[in-house]
């Protein structure tokens, strides 16, 4: 609550009675009439004024009235009454009558004390305004020895301003009459904090949040895949793996990740076949002649047979077929469960890869036992794949998480084009990672 104070010299006179006889009382009254009453009347009289306000707040009207009539107002400007818009016009009226008409039907009153005009609610009039401070002027026998009389309120009132005004002052035969005004103020309200308090979301510790900022991840793990360029049937093997690094942006429970990794596919190619030659006679023509009989020519051949021995040739393949791809992946994951130490998430992502090395022997057709070198095959320039997985992040320290993950991987295009069988790879991977938060 705040108060506005404006100038005024309008007094309120209260007398204190100290008389013992009618004679002394009459003497004092005569002295007052002779010495002080003209001055008192000048203090009480107020000239009339013209006053007009149009569509103004009541508080603004009071300021205008104070400036025009040289008054001093005190009131609680936080009350809604003083924000009301009013229009008012008066001609040749006393300022206090104008004030009374401004406050009509407002449940507010005013009290004039010394040079102060106090406006207050009639239902909550401060008790101290009603403190009895009225008395008759002292008797003449006491007037000569009168001393300064100042009456203060002794009971404690929270945050109270005490104003003491001298209403009538005489020298020699001194009579001082004082009036006390108490203006009680409400306890100041603490300023409200309009800022929305943030709810802590750190499930792990108070120093570092797992829901905002950045994180880095390094990982490796095996892949069970059906990669094969040897047989017509798909056979899953565990000779495959991937290793890489990732960078993650944390936003609440969402994680947006970009990474780079090396994916290695391999298979054991054990293959053997034999070629047998010989084991039969080879007939050779040594000479030939002919005869003519009845104008016909007959040819005769002289031959010889040679035995060709048996010759067996064995062909054995014991190599590791392998290809390596450098892949770039983008993924998004959501932490659907979290407690103090563990966060469980689901993930979806896609990646593009480029073959950076290849080595091995392919066997496109089992009926043709001769192998074909990888260098003679037509590998795709790029590979495209997608993956989906589920994993968890286990808190190891304030900045590190252990990160196991299981995911399903499938490529969308043929690794080797123009091949007799499908070379689209699919598999299940296990990723073991270490996350660092910074």
Image: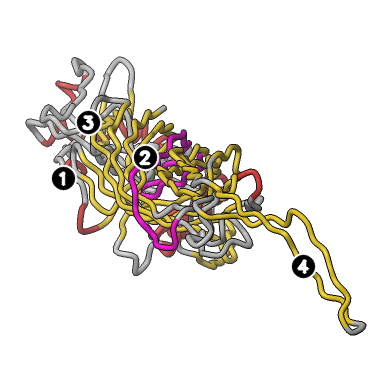
Q: Quadrant of the C terminus?
A: top left
Task: Specify the farthest residue to the right.
Answer: 295
Element under disc 1: helix
C-alpha span from label 1 to label 3: 35 Å
C-alpha span from label 2 to label 3: 24 Å
Element under disc 4: strand
Dot 1 or dot 3, earlier in sequence:
3
Q: What residue is shown with label 2?
A: 11
Task: Say which residue appears at 60% left-offset and 50% top-offset.
Answer: 306
Task: Say which residue appears at 50% left-offset and 50% top-offset.
Answer: 275
Q: Position of residue 197 (x, y in %)?
A: 32, 43
Q: What residue is shown with label 4?
A: 300
Dot 4 or dot 3, earlier in sequence:
3
Q: Position of residue 153 (x, y in %)?
A: 15, 30
Dot 1 or dot 4, earlier in sequence:
1
Q: Position of residue 318 (x, y in %)?
A: 43, 38
Q: What residue is shown with label 3?
A: 27
How are the colours assigned in the image?
secondary structure
Q: Nearer the viewer, residue 107 or 411?
A: 411
Dot 2 or dot 3, earlier in sequence:
2
C-alpha span from label 1 to label 4: 159 Å
Residue span colored magenta = 231-259
Q: What residue is shown with label 1?
A: 127
């Amino acid at each position: 609550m705040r108060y506005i104070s404006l100038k005024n010299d309008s007094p309120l006179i209260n007398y204190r009675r100290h008389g013992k006889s009618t004679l002394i009382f009459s003497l004092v009254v005569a002295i007052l009439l002779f010495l002080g009453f003209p001055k008192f009347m000048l203090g009480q009289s107020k000239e009339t004024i013209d006053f007009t306000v149009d569509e103004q707040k009541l508080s603004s009207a009071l300021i205008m009235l104070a400036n025009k009539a040289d008054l001093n107002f005190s009131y609680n400007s936080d009350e809604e009454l003083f924000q009301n818009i009013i229009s008012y016009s008066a001609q040749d009226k006393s300022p206090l009558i104008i004030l009374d008409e401004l406050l009509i039907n407002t449940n507010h009153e005013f009290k004039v004390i010394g040079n102060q005009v106090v406006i207050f609610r009639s239902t909550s009039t401060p008790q101290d305004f009603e403190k009895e401070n009225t008395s008759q002027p002292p008797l003449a026998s006491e007037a000569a020895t009168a001393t300064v009389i100042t009456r203060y309120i002794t009971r404690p009132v929270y945050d109270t301003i005490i104003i003491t005004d001298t209403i009538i002052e005489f020298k020699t035969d001194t009579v001082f009459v004082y009036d006390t005004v108490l203006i009680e103020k409400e306890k100041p309200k603490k300023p409200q904090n309009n800022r929305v308090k943030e709810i802590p979301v750190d499930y792990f510790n108070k120093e570092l949040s797992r829901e905002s900022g950045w994180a880095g991840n390094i990982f490796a793990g095996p892949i069970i895949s059906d990669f094969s360029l040897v047989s017509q049937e798909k056979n899953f093997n565990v000779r495959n793996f991937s290793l890489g690094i990732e960078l993650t942006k944390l936003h609440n429970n969402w994680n947006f990740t970009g990474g780079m990794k090396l994916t290695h596919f391999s298979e054991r190619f054990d293959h053997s076949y034999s070629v047998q030659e010989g084991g039969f006679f080879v007939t050779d023509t040594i000479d030939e002649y002919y005869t003519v009989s009845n104008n016909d020519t007959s040819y005769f051949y002289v031959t010889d047979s040679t035995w060709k021995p048996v010759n067996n040739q064995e062909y054995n393949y014991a190599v590791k077929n392998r290809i390596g791809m450098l892949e770039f992946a983008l993924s998004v994951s959501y932490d659907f469960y979290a407690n103090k130490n563990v966060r469980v998430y689901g993930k979806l992502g896609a990646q593009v890869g480029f073959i950076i090395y290849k080595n091995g022997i392919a066997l496109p057709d089992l009926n043709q036992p001769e192998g074909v070198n990888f260098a003679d095959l037509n590998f795709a320039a790029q590979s495209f794949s997608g993956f989906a997985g589920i994993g968890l992040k286990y808190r190891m320290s304030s900045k590190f998480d252990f990160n196991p993950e299981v995911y399903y991987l499938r490529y969308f295009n043929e690794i080797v084009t123009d091949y007799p069988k499908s070379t689209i790879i699919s598999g299940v991977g296990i990723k073991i990672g270490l996350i660092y938060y910074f």
